[in-house]
Every structure is written in C-alpha cells, then in structure tokens.
Image (spheres, rainbow, N blue to C red):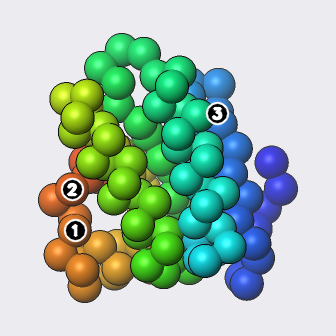
C-alpha cells in the first residue's frame, strides 16, 4: 500500500483480516471507490457480518464519503451487523459529529485498547 499525503486521491486496500483500509481523500471522486470496496467486502463478510473500515489515514472526507459509509451502515443493519470505523481521523470524527451520525457506527480507537 502506498502512503497518501495531503490532497492525495483515495487509496483503498483490504487487509488480510478483511478490514478495509482507506487513506487520502474520500470526496466526490473517492466516495464511489470506497462504495465499490464496501459492497465487495459485504458480499464476502463472515462471522457477524460486520465490516471494519480503518480510517486512520483519511485526510479529508466530504458528504460523498459520508454517504458511502452511511449506506454501508444501513445495509449492515439489514443484516443485523455493524460498520466499525477503526481509528477515524480527526476530519472523519468532525464530520460525524457535525452531522450527528456518530451513533450509526461502532467506533474503535486502536490506540486506547
């Protein structure tokens, strides 16, 4: 995986444990990329059906990215599962707080475990 710096396009990979790792910008261009990977992983999820999205490296997120995450959360709810946001960056946390959507996700802070 390549590291994404400020103003970089979105880079999305899937870790061996099935977690989706996003870095860079989740914007109007990156939202559909994330959406595609979310849908692919939902089709392959096992266990409780939850989807883990590591957002540590996300430098920017807008309403397009939020829409992708909320859509995944809605679909997960239909399967009695959750979308887990792992170590969301400060920009992701800010958008979730501003929009009042934090409760739609399970938030995992890897540094505090």
Judging by the rendered image, the residue that carries numbered circle 2 is 104
103 left or right, relative to 74: left
Report if the CB atoms under discs 1 and 2 are less than 8 Å apart: yes
Determine whether 33 is above or below 42 in the image. Answer: below
Of tags 1 and 3, which is closer to the observer? 1
Place residue 5 in its image quadrant: bottom right
Quadrant, the C terminus: top left
**Foreground: 88 or 40?**
40
Judging by the rendered image, the residue that carries numbered circle 3 is 15
Residue 61 shows in this picture: yes
Q: Secondary structure at mark 1?
A: loop
Task: Please give the name of the residue rendered at 51% of the width and 58% of the height, measured from the top-left corner.
Answer: 55
Mark 2 vs 3, N-terminal side: 3
Place residue 67 in its image quadrant: bottom left
Q: Position of residue 52 (x, y in %)?
A: 44, 40
Q: Position of residue 93 (x, y in %)?
A: 34, 73
40 left or right, relative to 68: right
Task: Indicate which disc residue 18 carries.
Answer: none
Mark 1 vs 3, N-terminal side: 3
Number of other residues with Cα within 10 Å of mark 3, as a class: few under 14, some 14 to 19, many 20 or more? few
Judging by the rendered image, the residue that carries numbered circle 1 is 101
């Amino acid at each position: 995986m390549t590291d994404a710096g400020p103003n970089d396009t979105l880079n999305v990979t899937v870790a061996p444990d099935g977690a989706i790792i996003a870095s860079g910008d989740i914007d109007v261009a990156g939202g559909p990329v994330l959406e595609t990977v979310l849908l692919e992983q939902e089709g392959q999820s096992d266990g409780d059906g939850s989807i883990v999205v590591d957002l540590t490296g996300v430098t920017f997120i807008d309403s397009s990215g939020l829409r992708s995450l909320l859509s995944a959360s809605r679909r997960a709810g239909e399967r009695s599962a959750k979308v887990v946001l792992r170590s969301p960056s400060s920009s992701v946390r800010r958008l979730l707080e501003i929009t009042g959507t934090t409760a739609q996700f399970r938030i995992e802070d890897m540094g505090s475990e």
